[in-house]
Each structure stands twice: as C-alpha cells, then as structure tokens.
Amino acid sequence: MDHDVIKPYSKEGEKKEQVQTMFDKLAPYYDFLNRLLTLRIDVVWRRNAIKMVSNPQVKDICDIATGTADLAIAMAKTMPLAQVTGVDIAVKMLEVGDKKIEAQGLSNRIKLEKGDSESLRFDDASFDLITSSFGVRNFQNLSGGLAEMFRVLRPGGKIMVLEFSRPRIFPIKQLFNIYFQYVLPFIGKITSKDPRAYKYLYESVQQFPDYERFSSVLQEVGFVKTSFKPLTFGICTVYLASKP
Ligand SMILES: C[S@@+](CC[C@H](N)C(=O)[O-])C[C@H]1O[C@@H](n2cnc3c(N)ncnc32)[C@H](O)[C@@H]1O
C-alpha cells in the first residue's frame, strides 16, 4: 500500500522532499512544540513504548526517522549494552539530536546519520531491534519503508513502531478532533511560523492506516506476532512485531 496522498505543502512533487523540507524548517522548534502541544505526554509515550521492547541483551538498535533523537537517547539509557544507530532524512533534525547526545555523554553509544528509510545502507540482518516513533506516517511509501526495516532486522528480532492513531471512544474522539484540527495547527503556526506543518499532522493522522490496518501492513511485509496497544485513549498506539 503506497502512503503518498497527504503531502505537507503541495499535491505536486515528491512527498519525501516536502517532508524533509518541513522537518528541516521545524527542527529548531520541534522539541519545544512536542512538549507544549502534548503537555509532555510524548515523553511518557516513548518511555512506555520502550518498556515493551526493553531487554538488557539487545546490542544493535536502529531508530528509523530518529529526528532529534529522543527515542534513541531514552533507549540507550534503558538498555546499557545497546549501540543505537539513528537514521533520518532531515539533517537539521539530526543536528539538534547530536547536540543532545553530546550533552548527555552518549556520543559513544548513539550515532546519527542521514538516510532514507526506504533504502537503508545496512546489510541484511544487522539489528536486534528496529524502532520508529512518529516516523512511519511520514513515509512516502509505507510498505517500502517497513520492508527495509524487515530486511535489516535479524531473524527473531523485534520492531516497535509508535504512531498517532485516531481515538474511537466518545468524547475523546470529538475532543481530539477539535484539538488536532484547530488548536494544534493554530499554536504550531504561531510558534514554528510554518502554517502547513501542523495541518499536515492532522491530515496525515486521518489518512494513516491505524490499529488493525497497520498490523495488516506489517503482516503483508512478512512480520509475525503482530500486536498493538493504544496509549492515552488511543491518541497514539504502540505496534510490535517480530521477524520469523
Ligand atoms: C514527527 S518526526 C519524529 C521524530 C522522532 N522519532 C520523535 O519521536 O520525535 C518524523 C521524522 O521522520 C523523518 N522522516 C520522514 N520520512 C523519512 C524517510 N523516508 N526516511 C528517514 N526519515 C524520515 C522526518 O525527517 C522527521 O524527522
């Protein structure tokens, strides 16, 4: 299933280029806005998602669409033997991440590099664990990106994806829609000066194949033992799967 309908700026042109431009522009404001717009719950979501895959034996982790490296940093702290490789197409996001990694004395445990999730430079079966938080919704080709994750994962390895989903319960569904459709783009526009960025967030969440549908995409790519756990009334969901 191609995931290329909703694009940040224009119907014309590649989604990937537009996503890269948008996150390069957002980079200076990204962490601040994440904390503000989620009232810091994003930190709790990442922590809960890591708990579901945390294993002291894990050595090689790849964090896809790592952005400013929040998930990569939290995983390095939780799994003491792990070396984390973070990949992202937006260099400005990685620059912010690198500063945080250095400040936390984790430069020998986490390496960030520019790369496209749909054509990773790594050999087959290179990692024990592959993760992505709030990244896969932005892929131009969702199954292409997931197939690359499958390829570079070792047999028996796990994937963990954290992504926004649409709450189904009244009145959370209605409140979430008002907040995501109107409040969040308004605050995002004033703060980041990009009027499209947080509208794109709402639109891309509406279009994303969440819950069972995302599990099906994982299965189509070859993953087994798929499961998902909604967090905070389903505002976001953790998806888990393994490579046979
Ligand atoms: C919403 S941010 C998430 C960043 C981080 N994982 C977090 O939890 O805050 C989405 C990230 O996905 C990256 N991204 C989008 N498409 C990508 C692709 N094809 N390959 C690599 N990174 C991609 C963007 O550049 C951006 O940094």
Image (tube, rainbow, N blue to C red):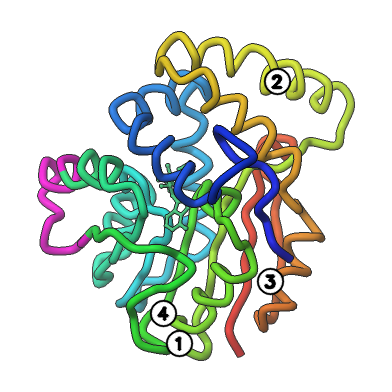
Give the distance between the C-alpha atoms of the residues marked 2 and 1, in whole angstroms. Answer: 40 Å
Q: Residue at x 49, y 68 (%)?
A: 118
Q: CA distance from mark 1 to mark 4?
A: 6 Å
Quadrant in which residue 147 is drawn:
bottom right
Task: Say which residue label 3 marks.
Answer: 218
Disc 4 marks a residue whose amino acid type is Asp
Residue 144's quadrant in the figure?
bottom right
Q: Which mark is residue 128?
A: 4
Q: Which residues are magenta?
A: 99-111
Classed neighbour count for the residue bearing mark 2: other residues with Cα under 10 Å, few (<14), some (14–19), many (≥20): some
Q: Which residue is mark 2?
A: 181
Give the image location of residue 66, x and y in percent: 37, 52
The residue where tag 1 is placed is 154
Q: Are marks 1 and 4 in contact (CB under 8 Å)?
A: yes
Residue closer to the observer: 203 or 81: 203
Q: Please state which of residues 233 and 66 is positioned toward the viewer in this rendering.
A: 66
* Magenta span includes 9: no
User: Element at badge 4?
Assistant: strand
* Amino acid type assigned to the residue bearing label 1 in the image: Arg
Q: Which numbered disc flags the more N-terminal residue, 1 or 4?
A: 4
Instruction: Please tell me how crowded label 4 is: few (under 14), some (14-19), or many (20+) other residues with Cα within 10 Å.
Output: many
Out of 54 and 191, give the one closest to the viewer.
191
The amino acid type found where label 3 is placed reads Leu
